[in-house]
Amino acid sequence: MGHVIGIDLGTTYSCIAYLEGGKPVVIPNLEGLPTTPSVVSFTASGERLVGTLAWRQAATNPANTFYAVKRLIGQKFASAEIQEALTKLPYGLKEAPNGDVAVVLGDKTLSPPEISAMVLGYLKTCAESFFGEPVTQAVITVPAHFNDAQRQATKDAATICGLEVQRVVNEPTAAGLAYGLDTKKNGLAAVYDLGGGTFDITVLEASDGVFNVLATNGDSYLGGEDFDNRILEWLVTSFKAETRIDLRADKLALQRLKEAAEKAKRELSFTAETEINLPFIISDKAKSNHIRKTLSRSTFEAMTADLVERTLPHIERALDDAKVAADRIDHVILVGGQTRMPLVKERVTKFFGCKPEEKVDPDQIVAMGAAIQSGILDGQVRDLVLLLDVTPFALGIETENDGYEMIIERNTTIPTRKVKAFTTVEHNQRRVRIHVLQGEGFLASLNKSLAVFELVGIEPAPAGVPQIDVTFEINADGLVRVSAKDKETGLGQKVEVRPSSGLSEAEVEELRRKQSGLGMAAKGANG
Ligand code: AMP
């Protein structure tokens, strides 16, 4: 069997690793770097660039440079998240025929999994050039708080680029694995993961090779980008006050501001003050305008303190669900580049009353954990015997009059399977509509729609007589399957499934053929 790679497909950066002699090792990209910007760009001549090359020309080609696509994956165009993204992204978004969000490239559109597949394809090429042989299998990580649609879309992205996904692992769980294996530490751990676009907190217990995730919580719409945006807004507002020019209208200027904001943010993790210098940010008739501003760490902290505070109720909720008090946590593990910010470290230290561990690089630990998971699956890793994860969301179905019946509670250990019996409400009812929802709202309309099933061909019977068993399954990847069966008629019942989002299997296959036909794997970064 060839090599299996562990992939951390990040919002801003991605990283790949593999297992060598039972130890995780990061695979460098084609430029020799451990992490790769999760960016795809199309030049005027139609050339596709991925990674560092794509990011380098973002400022001059903002409308065709696609970054932070992880924030779009598995999302509906009409969702609040996408409507907010529309105001911030320099590239266009559109509604796909099935209601999903699509990315605009000239007169075409691309689905988010298609773009993520290009990033994954580049990472695959890096691994192939490293090993000197084809790589076809991977373990891929997702934020613990990703829902079914986001997980499925990520898996689709891997399939499109020709990678078979052995397992989808939650990022904080992967980090816990990498940390635990490295130090052989038993006890209770909290993994605080603040990446480019998402925040997760996971409480897990490690004991002699068994990893038991007790609870997870988070916000799939809070991350480093929000910190960059605060600096960006500050620059735009002060520039407008000084010149009356609104830089938001200029895509090129916005992209330069965004890059400068992120750079300033990174610098402020290590220095007390930084200078933001953007000559010729815009030409206004005869006059050229420049930006030259000094930003202190304390001002930046005041601008973003509320973002850090927003993570705390999630920690409380995860601890509550795990039935663990903050002072019982033995190890706090920081994951994600944004945790390098001193204010984040301070706040987390204060919350738990202990200093976070800093031994493993927060940018690489997730990919390393994914590589370890591949080793657990193929038996290379023997001292870790079991990994028990949980589902982040409650699942249930719609009942009469906008009612909601919860079937699987959040933080249930996966894989899991629950069967629930339902009946008809009308005499001689021949079909039953089953609406699967995610959430904990007491009304169906307060929850997120996952899929609609129709069970047809129920034998005519008085209301309340037929027994319909609805089976909910969540597999080890965190993916949901729901099926329904009329007990009376038994097997052979037809179940019509209308998933409410995502690409169909045929679309994934078509895109896979298209991308492999383009020979992306062979062309790498310039492919
Ligand atoms: P990840 O998704 O883990 O790659 O996290 C990337 C995020 O971490 C991005 O928003 C980066 O801007 C941010 N980041 C990286 N390095 C630093 C740093 N030194 N200080 C603050 N944020 C950082």
Image (cartoon, rainbow, N blue to C red):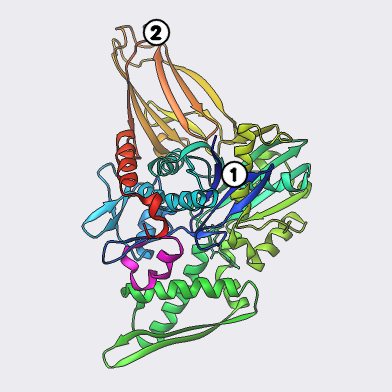
Q: Is ligand 1 within 8 Å of the beta carbon of the residue shown at mark 2?
A: no
Per the image, is 54 magenta?
Answer: yes
Q: Residue lying furthest bottom in this view?
A: 286
Which residue is tagged 1?
Answer: 370
Q: CA distance from mark 2 to mark 1?
A: 41 Å
The relative height of residue 445 versus residue 351 in the rendered view (above or below) is: above
Residue depicted at x 59% and y 44%: 370
- First to last magenta residue range: 49-65
Q: Quadrant of residue 4?
A: top right
404 and 257: which one is in front?
257
Give the crowd class for mark 2: few <14, some 14-19, many >=20 residues within 10 Å: few
Answer left or right for 139 relative to 463.
Answer: right
Which residue is tagged 2?
Answer: 490
Q: Quadrant of residue 378?
A: top right
Q: Position of residue 28 (x, y in %)?
A: 56, 57
Q: Position of residue 302 (x, y in %)?
A: 59, 73
In the rendered view of the protein, which quadrant contains the C terminus? bottom left
Mark 2 secondary-structure assignment: loop
In the rendered view of the protein, which quadrant contains the N terminus? top right
| Amino acid on which the number 2 mark rests in the picture | Gly
The relative height of residue 74 versus residue 391 in the rendered view (above or below) is: below
Mark 1 secondary-structure assignment: helix
Answer left or right for 315 relative to 286.
Answer: right
The relative height of residue 219 versus residue 482 in the rendered view (above or below) is: below
Q: Residue lying furthest front in this view?
A: 132
Q: Position of residue 41 (x, y in %)?
A: 36, 62
